[in-house]
Amino acid sequence: MTSLSVSADAALFGQGMAFPPRLDGEGRFSWAVGQQSVRESIRIILTTEPGERLMLPSFGAGLRSFLFEPNVPATHRLIEERIQFALRRWEPRVALDAVLVRPHPDDPARAVVAITYALVATAAREAIDLSVPVGGGVST
């Protein structure tokens, strides 16, 4: 990217310190700019539990609450709803297309989440995948 396109991307989507915080090759803190800033924001929202941020106690998706839930379609639907609610509330730069949750193919204690969205400013389509720890198996 040229510096002009980086500036335009930053103007559209913003910029902030990269998360997790890290140093660049010159020993300065790295910055997330533009679309990368949006992706990192989504990950922060989804990995934050409500109550973790003292000044913003309702921030976050609360996905850790599924740790002891069975890895079944009903739980997957609840995870989908929680993610949709959190992203619609906390990330106005995206319009959700789909949130799909399914069991991890190799780990019964994880559910795989696929999120597709459009960037509001440009309509560019993006996708993020992550895994959510769940109780595993079917409850008896």
Image (cartoon, grey):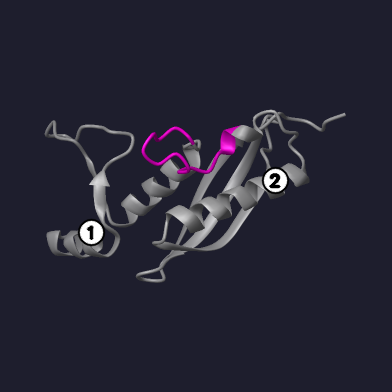
Which disc is residue 10 wearing? 1
> How many residues crowd mark 2 within 10 Å: few (<14), some (14–19), many (20+)?
many
- Asked which quadrant contains residue 3, the reply is bottom left
- For the record, the magenta segment spans 51-64
Where is residue 20 shown, x and y percent of the image? Answer: 33, 34
Report the predominant secondary structure element of the magenta stretch. loop
Residue drawn at x 43%, y 49% is: 42
The quarter in which the N terminus is drawn is bottom left
* Residue 133 seen in render: no
The amino acid beneath tag 1 is: Ala
The amino acid beneath tag 2 is: His
Residue drawn at x 25%, y 32% is: 22
Instruction: Look at the image and say whether residue 53 sits in the magenta stretch.
Output: yes
Query: In the picture shown, does residue 53 fall above or below 125?
Result: above
Which disc is residue 76 wearing? 2
Residue drawn at x 88%, y 29% is: 140
Mark 1–mark 2 distance (CA, rounded to whole Å): 35 Å
Query: In the picture shown, does residue 123 fall above or below 111?
Result: below
Q: Earlier in the sequence, mark 1 or mark 2?
A: 1
Where is residue 31 shown, x and y percent of the image? Answer: 22, 44
Q: Secondary structure at mark 1?
A: helix
Query: In the picture shown, does residue 137 fall above or below 115?
Result: above
* Residue 15 seen in render: yes
> How many residues crowd mark 1 within 10 Å: few (<14), some (14–19), many (20+)?
some
Q: Secondary structure at mark 2?
A: helix
Residue drawn at x 36%, y 53% is: 38
